């Protein structure tokens, strides 16, 4: 078993598999593993949150809740991208509507 695929139980210090939900030694319940902050993951998250704006909020709050400062920064960037994406959609929609109504002579 690789060392990187293991974590140490904070209660009894037994090495436990990373994907384990409980320590087999003492029954300690593990939190979710820290979220990835790799460049590839960041690019995916930023693209995802921009293109699928409201769905990105799910990731934004997940990352903002992380204790890691880098993860929190990523969460805030996702949140900002989501806001920008939603604002762009609203502006585009207004522009399209006004050009359609304008060409129909309703406005
Ligand atoms: Zn334990």
Image: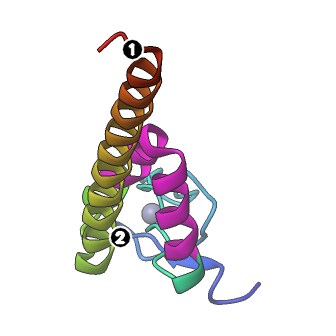
Quadrant showing the N terminus: bottom right
Q: Residue furthest front?
A: 105
Q: Would residue 15 be visible to someone looking at this image?
A: no
Position of residue 57 in the picture relative to residue 4 (left or right): left
Q: Position of residue 32 (x, y in %)?
A: 46, 56
Residue 46 within the segment the image draws in magenta: yes
Helix, strand or loop at mark 1: loop
Note whether ligand 1 is within 8 Å of mark 1: no
Quadrant showing the C terminus: top left
Q: Residue at x 61, y 57 (%)?
A: 20
Note whether ligand 1 is within 8 Å of mark 2: yes
Q: Position of residue 37 (x, y in %)?
A: 45, 78
Q: Quadrant of ligand 1?
A: bottom left
- Whether tag 1 and tag 2 are in contact, CB under 8 A, the answer is no
Q: In the depicted view, which residue is nearer to us: 98 or 30?
A: 98
Say which quarter of the image contains residue 30. Answer: bottom left
Labels in figure, total: 2
Residue 71 within the segment the image draws in magenta: no
Q: Residue at x 47, y 50 (%)?
A: 27
Q: Position of residue 63 (x, y in %)?
A: 34, 60
Residue 105, labelled with which disc?
A: 1
Helix, strand or loop at mark 2: loop
Q: In the depicted view, which residue is nearer to us: 71 or 49?
A: 49
Q: Which residue corresponds to mark 2? A: 10
CA separation in Å, label 1 and label 2: 70 Å
Q: Which residues are magenta?
A: 41-61
Relative vertical location of residue 11 with respect to residue 37 in this rendering, above or below: above
């Amino acid at each position: 078993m690789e060392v990187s695929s293991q974590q140490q139980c904070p209660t009894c210090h037994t090495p436990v598999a990373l994907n384990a939900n409980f320590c087999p030694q003492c029954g300690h319940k593990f939190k979710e593993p820290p979220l990835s902050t790799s460049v590839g993951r960041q690019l995916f998250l930023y693209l995802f949150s921009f293109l699928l704006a409201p769905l990105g909020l799910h990731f934004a709050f997940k990352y903002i809740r992380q204790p890691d400062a880098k993860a929190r920064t990523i969460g805030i960037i996702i949140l900002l991208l989501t806001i920008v994406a939603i604002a762009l959609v609203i502006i585009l929609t207004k522009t399209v509507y006004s050009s359609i109504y304008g060409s129909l002579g309703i406005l």
